[in-house]
Each structure stands twice: as structure tokens, then as C-alpha cells.
Image (cartoon, helix red, strand yellow):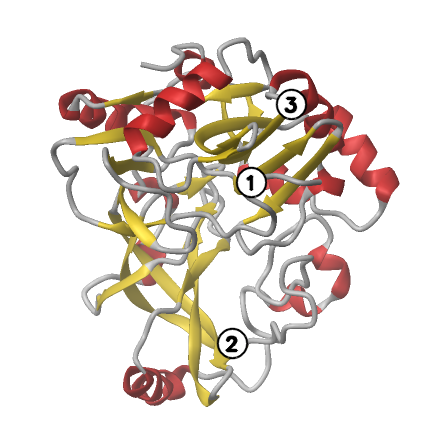
Amino acid sequence: MELPVMPPVKPMLAKSVKSIPPGMQYEGKWDGFRAIIFRDGPEVELGSRTGKPLTRYFPELVDALRKNLPQRCVLDGEIVIAREGRLDFDALTERIHPAQSRVKLLAEQTPASFVAFDLLAVGDESLLTAGQADRRARLVAALETARTPVFVAPATTDAALAEEWFHAFEGAGLDGVVAKPLDLPYRPNERSMYKIKHERTADVVVAGYRFHKSGPVVGSLLLGLYDAGGVLQHVGVCAAFSISRRKELIEELEPLRMDSVADHPWAAWAEEAAHEGARLPGAPSRWSGKKDLSWVPVRPERVLEVAYDHLENGARFRHTTQWRRWRPDRAPESCTYAQLEEPARYALLDILSGGAS
């Protein structure tokens, strides 16, 4: 492989802002695996956000990219999987599997798509120093004949339309809007763009915690919600604290700390069989590797208000939640899924078939 922009390349990133800034290019914020695609004739490589290759996990995409991309190019975009008309991040994570036979099976059962939103090089020309508007025009031209499962992400310079997208696209599994200055060159691994994400609040039960890697202070709080059957389900974590706050949390939760999980609602999770097909506080994963995922149970008696962006498959928080405040006025049993806001459904194909604007 010999291209004007060579792997590995870490993608350009975005910083969070509260509202949509004016005078920029706007796109939906896709919820998938960020990927830099390198193609040089028959050679195709899919690089992850960290620079590690994803190629072996998506053989069906490699074939599709050979059919739909220019002979020599470098693209930035998102690998996604859709189920029932919306993005499914769970199905995407299942694709990262060590067994090649499993990879092949999942490629057939849950094929992935690639949504391109930037062009870093084409032919012998690097576009890293070109402005965003120029790169967008070149991207649209380069993928003019591309067909499913390769798409160009819809984009607009109309801030009012971007505001509509912000609310409507969530129903298809997107998690906000990205704004890009029109004259912005491509800056790998720099937060030069802007992201506007949904934020809502929920009252959750704190049912345990993990220690921080630095020592005996709280690393993350394990959060639960009661389902319709009255069972406390693990729904995510809250983890962004200063060191001093991590120490305070240990003291605050000490009166609730349990000597064992025997009488805890998540007691069964100590058994290996309970982790089959589930994401639980002590479950190993292909992402965590040998990371210590042991946890400390506490009596589920304290309620915490957290901010979150959206739910994954209506069951748990997609990203780490943000601390807001303790809620001593709330009973743990009142923390149910019923309080969570569900966006109106929006067909993913309606977004992708809209093409580039």
C-alpha cells in the first residue's frame, strides 16, 4: 500500500458544546465505530479510532469498499449496523470476535454499512490541508456512484435544518449533531470540530462501585433501575470525579457497604453462568481484556440524579453518565424505566437515502 496519507491515522475529534454554532457544516452524529478507510487498488485497510486495524472483523465491508470507492483514496467515516430501521451498537460490538468462523457468520447475519463523512486523500493528492467545504465537495464527487452498503453522510449548512436533524435523527439511533467550520483543515487527533449531544436526567439507584486504578477510592458507581417486574437492572455507570470527590464517595457509601453479594439484588452475577449473553458489572469483555472488573456491593438505598444522552436498545445508558446530585427525597423503588424519555422513531433509511446536500 502506497498512498499520500498512510496508516495509521487517528481521526479528527470534536469538543462538546451546548448549542449548534452558526455558519458551519452540520451532520448527524453517528453511533458506530469510527474508522479511517485506506484503499490502494485491491488493498483495503480499516483503521480504528486508536489506529488499530478493524479489517478482519468486517470482511463484507472490505468487499463492498472495493466495489464502491475510488481506486486510491483515504476516507473518514463510521461503521454502523442497522436493525429494524435504527442503529444497533450492541450488534456492532458483537462483531469484534477472536474466532474467524464467528466473524464470518456475523458478517452474513448482521452485515455492516459504512457512512463516509470526510475525504483525506484521493489518487496521489493529500487533502489534509484543504478546507472542510472543499473536502466535502470532493467526497460527494468521489462517491457519486457508491451504492449500499456505502453511503455519504447527509450534510447541510442550514443551521435551522441541523436543529431539526438534532431532534428527529435521534429516533433512528443517532446521538446528536456535529458542526464543522467550513475552512477547517483535517487535523488528526485534535478536537477541532464541535458536537452537540442530547442530555436528559434520570434518577437511578446506586447499587455498587468499582475501585479506581489509582487506589482505594471510587472509580465508578454502578447504577440500577427497576423494571416492570420489580427487578433491579444494571443500566450503566457514573465515573467522572475528581480525586478528592472519589475519596468522599468512599466515606459516603461506607455505611451501605455489604460484606458479600449474598443478599444483594445482583447476587447471581457472582456466578459465571449469569454472564452468558449479558453485560453485567463483573462480566469480562473483548474490550476490557484483563482489566479488573470486580465490584463492591452496597445496599441499594441511595438515589442519584445523573445526566445521560440516550439509551441503548431501551435498556441501558449508551455512554458514561454525568453526576448531578444525590436525591434523598426519592425512594429507590421509584427509580424505574418509566421515567425515561423515548424519542419518536425515525427511519434510518430515510436519512441515508436523502443523499448529500
Q: Are marks 3 and 1 in contact (CB under 8 Å)?
A: no
Q: Nearer the viewer, residue 41 or 27?
A: 41
Q: Residue 69: x, y in percent? A: 60, 21
* Marks 3 and 2, how far apart at CA: 55 Å
Mark carried by residue 71: 3
Q: Amino acid at mark 2?
A: Pro
Q: Amino acid at mark 1?
A: Pro
Q: Residue 151: x, y in percent? A: 51, 19
Q: Nearer the viewer, residue 128 or 250?
A: 128
Say which quadrant the C terminus sits in.
top left
Q: Earlier in the sequence, mark 2 or mark 1?
A: 1
Say which quadrant the N terminus sits in.
top right
The residue to which callout 2 is attached is 297
Q: Residue furthest right?
A: 101
SS state under label 1 = loop
Inspect this view and state whether residue 345 appears. no
Mark carried by residue 4: 1
What residue is drawn where x is 40% and y is 48%? 12
Q: Residues within 10 Å of mark 3 (few under 14, many from 20)?
A: some
* Marks 3 and 1, how far apart at CA: 13 Å
What residue is drawn where x is 67% and y is 59%? 285
What residue is drawn where x is 48% and y is 43%? 315
* Marks 2 and 1, how far apart at CA: 53 Å
